[in-house]
Amino acid sequence: MCRISVDRRRIAGLMEREIAEFVSKHPRSGAMFERAKASLLAGVPMNWMVRWAGPYPIFAREAKGSRIWDVDGHEYVDLCLGDTGAMFGHSPDTVVERVRGQAAKGITTMLPTEDSIWVSEELSRRFGLPYWQVALSATDANRFSVRLAREVTGRSIVLVVRGCYHGSVDETLIDLEGGKVVPRSGNIGPPVDPVVTTRVVEFNDTEALHRALAPEDVACVLCEPAMTNRGIILPDPGYHEALREMTARHGTVLIIDETHTICCGPGGYTREHGLSPDMLTIGKPIGCGIPAAAFGINERVARAVMKRILDDGTDESGLGGTLSGNALSVAAMRATLESVITEEAFDRMTPLAVRFEKGVVDAITEHGVPWHVTRLGVRVEYHFMPRAPRNGREAEEAKDAELEKLLHLMALNRGILLTPFHNMALMSPSLTVEDVDRHTRVFRECLEAIFE
């Protein structure tokens, strides 16, 4: 699969124009970026922040609901929403009030609070797993879940999907090249050769999954129920049934990562589609941006690990950290689950996502552009290919970094923020029909500039 035929000289010319407009509009962000280079590695608090379109990132001054304001005074419709971290809007009033109250009463004590019981009961109700533990990030939740799976099975190998995203878990920063497991190109300083720890298959490939599990040496399969890191890739009919049957038959723990796919509903893809994983992880939006995550455990896994969990020395077991389960994070999780990640919120967000999808489909159809649009709940993405990709390889082959960066910068210059790593947009409850239609107008303008 090759890149769409686009006049590269036109792309370069438009990019030059858009960069000049960006620089003229963002002098304070530019000055802050230059200042930051003296004390922040790459001029940003985390290196991936330089991935935004433009010669430097805009610096945020304030964020609320579906809006961000930068230090130069510009207002943006935010369709990135912290790449899911603020998926339900920035700083909802109910969460702000609860966090403010808890901060005044104590941030962390190494003691459980009543909120932790409420949160675990609610997560059990939503996802169907009886036992829960609290972490500070989905990376930690995934890392801890992998350790428990290894403890339960006595096996070391982790099986993941090519193009997966599970935070910075070492075993998942991998790729396939000619059928061989190799470190992902952006993997900095992998501690061991991933062929020692990891097996990799393409998404939707049940034959490869069977071959990978057949030796019965795989501790766990860690996967998203629908892929999101290579763009939205939906499972084939019957894929999850096969995944569940094979992992059970071969004694492998099935871990579902719902951190991004909570976009499907209040119980994520798992509840919407009746999945039954052995473990489940979730982070990012569960605390509305306050560092918080959780992992659920079924009865079988819980029984197998309980003795070790209660042993002396588990403070050095590799599970948890001093701030894991702190009172502030748990309070944020309770407020978020009580009043933010609700059926009512999705009732508002889903029609907006459907409208967004239709607007983009209509625009690409009118301009005769062979692109495809995929929607996963309230997450929408367009791919530079004529049909939906079935796996990470197809999605990667269709990428066009120049075209993607141009589209993102054109949108940014017109007051719309898309997720910098993909052509992805998230709906939030505070988004309006007018906001969605504004994106459609900007998207049409971009297509006209590029293809006409």
Image: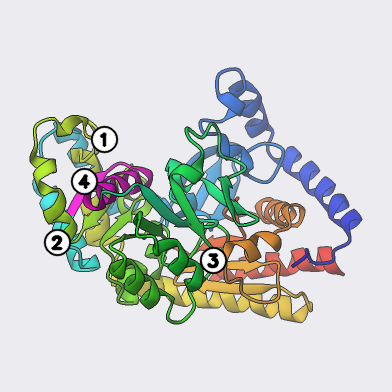
Residue at numbered disc 2: 299
- Gap in Å between the C-alphas at discs 2 and 3? 32 Å
The picture places residue 403, in percent across and down from the top left corner, at 75, 57
Q: Which residue is mark 1?
A: 318
Position above or below: 41 against 234: above
Looking at the rendered structure, the number of numbered marks drawn on it comes to 4
Is 257 situated above or below 127? above
The kind of secondary structure element at disc 1 is loop
Which residue is nearer to you in this view: 182 or 314?
A: 182
Q: Residue 217 placed where, x, y %?
A: 35, 55
Q: Based on the displayed image, in which of its 4 quarters is residue 42 positioned?
A: top right
Which residue is denoted by mark 4 in the rendering? Answer: 330
Q: Nearer the viewer, mark 4 or mark 3?
A: 3
Q: CA distance from mark 4 to mark 3?
A: 30 Å
Q: Quadrant of the C terminus?
A: bottom right
Q: Residue at x 50, y 45 (%)?
A: 195
Which disc, if any, is residue 334? none
In the displayed structure image, the side of residue 194 where residue 302 appears, left or right: left
**Magenta region, mostly helix, strand or loop?**
helix
